Image (cartoon, coloured by chain):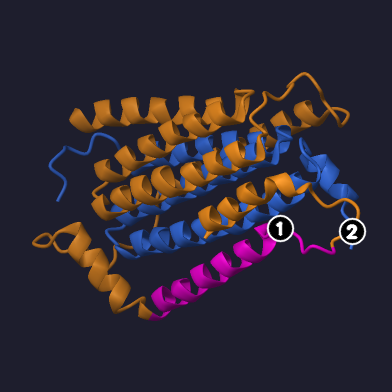
């Protein structure tokens, strides 16, 4: 019964937040709605005995990624509400909803035709009842997945360097459509934030 | 290890993740603000992470949780690079939408 209540409450928060991301006109409101969804997913991780991932979810997603979104919204000054009545492409929304119905229908049909999660239970990486989730997942990451773990370090370094290169303000000889020099401070801040 | 009785089967989580993925996909197709489109991509990534964790518990395999960890790293890298591109585009053309990216040239 507690898991049922947890699932219903967290699931409701997740879905309401997700609908809010899609429907709210203001980007800042959409970002805050995204935080609600991410917290709900973190609760569902805890309910499924994935404590480390729940912590990482809150720290990395809600803490870092959404703050990055908010920083970009603030720095660029695009915090104006979109006009959702404009529909630039003919029949974009009906087609999008049709695609959504298709995706949902396909996933649910395939799920229930297969009868839920199929496959054999693990023998190599089964969780050990005597140890915490954090210890087990940490050991797994530093032994079985050590190579992938090191690769993520390189990936993150490349991403940071790429972000700094992309978000750097253009060189002085950029041409006529260069920004006025008043925005120097903002641009420098931006590179620091993105790194 | 769960202290709670398993009334909620993994299928419930999978259905919830399917709905969450669909909302994210529809939002990605409908919205035109590039920042909100990125948020919808995050929704889809989270839906997939939720299925990985559900399968991890259903099949008693920690490998699923390790995969979610790497998905999170890739998502962080994707957001950093993607937002840098958005910054580079929007600095030139404030209030640009996803359609205006078609005007980019060499």
A8 to the left or right of A15: left
Marked residue chain, label 2: A
The hue used for chain B is: blue
Q: Is residue A155 magenta?
A: yes
Expressed as whole percent of the image width and height from the top left, the position of residue B78 reads 58, 58
What letter labels the chain drawn in orange? Answer: A
Q: Quadrant of the N terminus of chain A?
A: top left
Q: Is residue B44 magenta?
A: no
Residue A144 picture quarter: bottom left
The chain ID associated with circle 1 is A
Residue A22 can be seen, yes or no: yes
Q: Residue at x 76, y 60 (%)?
A: A170
Residue hosting label 2:
A175
Q: Residue furthest front?
A: A182
Taking the view exactly as shown, the residue that stands out farthest to the top is A85
Name the side, left or right, on which A34 lies relative to A183. Answer: left
Indicate which disc, 1 or 2, sits on the residue closer to the N terminus: 1
| A124 shown above or below B16 | below
Q: Which residue is mark 1?
A: A169
Q: CA distance from mark 1 to mark 2?
A: 13 Å
Identify which residue is drawn at 48% across, 31% down: A32
The region drawn magenta spans: A147-173
Q: Could you tell me which secondary element the residue under label 1 belongs to?
A: loop
Instruction: Give the label on residue B45, or none.
Output: none
Which element type, helix, strand or loop, lies under badge 2?
loop
């Amino acid at each position: 019964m507690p898991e049922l209540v947890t699932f219903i409450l967290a699931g409701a928060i997740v879905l309401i937040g997700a609908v809010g991301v899609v429907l709210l006109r203001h980007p800042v409101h959409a970002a805050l709605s995204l935080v609600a969804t991410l917290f709900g997913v973190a609760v569902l991780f805890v309910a499924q005995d994935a404590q480390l991932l729940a912590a990482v979810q809150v720290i990395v997603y809600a803490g870092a990624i959404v703050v990055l979104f908010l920083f970009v919204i603030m720095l660029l000054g695009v915090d104006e509400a979109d006009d959702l009545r404009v529909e630039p492409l003919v029949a974009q929304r009906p087609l999008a909803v049709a695609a959504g119905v298709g995706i949902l229908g396909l996933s649910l049909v395939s799920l229930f035709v297969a009868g839920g999660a199929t496959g054999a239970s693990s023998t190599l990486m089964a969780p050990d009842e005597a140890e915490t989730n954090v210890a087990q997942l940490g050991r797994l990451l530093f032994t079985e997945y050590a190579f992938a773990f090191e690769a993520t370090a390189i990936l993150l370094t490349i991403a940071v360097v790429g972000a700094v290169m992309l978000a750097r303000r253009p060189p002085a000889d950029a041409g006529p459509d260069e920004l006025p020099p008043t925005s120097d401070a903002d641009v420098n801040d931006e590179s620091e934030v993105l790194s | 290890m769960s202290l709670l009785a398993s009334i909620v089967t993994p299928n419930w989580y999978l259905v919830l993740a399917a709905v969450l993925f669909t909302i994210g996909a529809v939002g990605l197709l409908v919205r035109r603000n590039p920042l909100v489109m990125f948020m919808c991509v995050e929704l889809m990534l989270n839906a997939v992470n939720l299925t990985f964790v559900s399968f991890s518990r259903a099949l008693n395999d920690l490998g699923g949780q390790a995969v979610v960890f790497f998905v999170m790293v890739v998502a962080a890298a994707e957001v950093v690079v993607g937002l840098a591109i958005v910054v580079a585009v929007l600095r030139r053309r404030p209030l640009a939408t996803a359609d205006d990216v078609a005007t980019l040239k060499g």
